[in-house]
Image: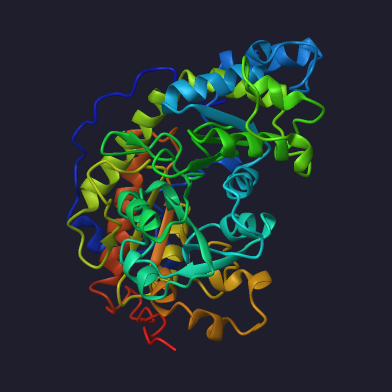
Amino acid sequence: MNGNDEDPAPTRPRPASHGAELHEQLALHGGAPIRRTPWPTYDKGAVHVCADDEEAAIRAIRSHLYFRYDHRTEAETECGQFEEELCRYFGTRHALAVSSGTAALALAIMGAAVPPGSLVACPGFTFVATPSAIVLAGCRPFLVEVDDDLRMDLDDLRRRWRPEIRAILVVHMRGFAADVAALAAFAAEMGVPLIEDAVPALGAELHGRKLGTFGVAGAFSTQSDKALNCGEGGFLVTDDSTLFGRAVALSGAYEGRLRRHFPGTEPPVDGLDLPLLSLRMDEIRAALLRAELTRLPQRLALFHRNYAQVSGALADLPGIAIRNPVAPGAYLGEAFVFRVPGGDAGWFARALRAEGIDARNIGADDDLNVRAFWNWRFMYDDRDPARVRATLPRTARLLAETVDVPLSSSLTPDDCDQLIRAVRKVAAAAGTPGGAAPDGSLPAAVGVEPVRA
C-alpha cells in the first residue's frame, strides 16, 4: 500500500550531472543500471490508496447493499453521494457514475443524441477506448492528425471537415490538455457538440478551469492508473439535463429509477424510450472513490511536483523534445512524454528499460501498443500497417519518435532523480540524433515520411 499521507514536500534542487553520463556504459551494453528496483506503476501496486479508503470500501461491503438502486434515497447511497461530491468538485449541474471511462464516453455521445452511423472526429493519438466508445455508441470514428505536441490538430480537422461529422471527441491524452477552448469554438461554428475524453486527465486544469467542463460533457475513468482508482469504473459530468437524463436511462435506471436523479421535478426524457445498457457503478467502488476524492488535491500536487522535477532537469537536454503544454501547468503530470526527432525512439526506450525505468516507444513496430492507431484493426479493411499509417502520416511519424515514461504519484524525489540520470545517460550514449552509441553502433532512424496520400 502506498499511503502518501503527507503533503508534498517542496521541490528541492536536484544535483544535475551534465557530463558524468558521457563516461557511463549503458546497461544495455553491460554497464551498471541506474536503478535495480522495479519502477513504480499501478500494475505493481503503486496506487494512491490509504487505510481510510480501504475502510470505506469495507464499510460498503459490510452493508450488503451493493446495487446503487435499493430501498434508500439517492442521497443516501454511495453512488448518489459520490455524484453530488463530483458536482461540487467540477462545478457542474450533473454527474453520473458508471462502469468505465469507455462507458462514460459512449453514454456522452448517445446522451448528446448524435445520430447512429454519424462520423465522430477524434485525434489519431489516443487510447483505443476512444474509437471503441464511438463504435459502442453506434457511430464511426473519423481520425484527425495531431501536432508536434501530440494534440488534436484543429487545422487538419478544419481542412478535412465533412458534413457527416456530427460530433467532435477531443482527448486530453496522457494528461495534457488539448486546445479545448479553440476546439469548442470550432464545434459551435460547425453546430456539433464537443465531448471531452478527459479519461487520462482527471483533476487537470486549463486556465483555472477543470478539464471535462469545456464541452457538452466530460468523461472520466477511475481505472487503476487514474487519479481516482477503484480498479474499474468511470463517470461523466455535464450541465445539460437532457443529455444527463438520456445517459442515466441508458446506463440502467429502469422502472422509474430515473426519477431519483431529478428530485422534485420530472425527468426531461422518458426512460422507456431508450435501451437499457447496464453500465452502472456499484456501491463498493463508489465508497472507495468517495474516500479517495478527499485526497485528490494532494495526489495532484504530487503529480505536479514529480513532473516539474523531471521536466525541469531535462528541459535543456539536446536530442529530445519534451512535450509542451498548451498553457503553463495545463497537464496532470502522470507521464513524461518526449520525442527523439530523427533518432531511434525504440532504441532509446529499450535503453531506458535496461537502466531500470519503464519506458515505451509509442510507435514501435515490435510493440502492439493500442495507443498507435494502426493497431486498431477493427477500424480498417486493410491489414497492412504501413498503408494504415499513411492515412495519418504526420501522426504516425510523431508516434514513431515518441517515448512514454509513467510517473506514479508515489514516486519520490530520489526516484525522479534516477529517471533524470537515466535519460541523460541514454541521451549521452546516443549523442546527437543519429549519433553513435558507446559500442559504435548507430541507432537507426525511424519514422514515416510525412506524405499525404
Quarter of the view holding residue 253:
top right
x, y percent for residue 299: 42, 28
x, y percent for residue 281: 69, 31
Task: Check the image and report above or below for 357 versus 360.
Answer: above
Query: Could you tell me which quadrant the C terminus lies in?
Result: bottom left
In this picture the colour scheme is rainbow
**In this orientation, does residue 187 appear?**
yes
13 or 36: which is nearer to us?
Answer: 13
Query: Could you tell me which quadrant the N terminus lies in?
Result: top right
Task: Check the image and report above or below for 55 versus 140.
Answer: above
x, y percent for residue 120: 54, 62
379 or 160: which is nearer to us?
Answer: 160
Residue at position x 67%, y 81% in the image: 381
**In this orientation, does residue 3 appear?**
no
Task: Check the image and report above or below for 281 versus 133.
Answer: above
Task: Check the image and report above or below for 449 versus 266.
Answer: below
269 or 5: which is nearer to us?
Answer: 269
Residue at position x 54%, y 75% in the image: 365
Label tally: 0
Quarter of the view holding residue 451:
bottom left
Residue at position x 75%, y 10% in the image: 72
Image side of residue 352 versus residue 237, left or right:
left
x, y percent for residue 175: 41, 46
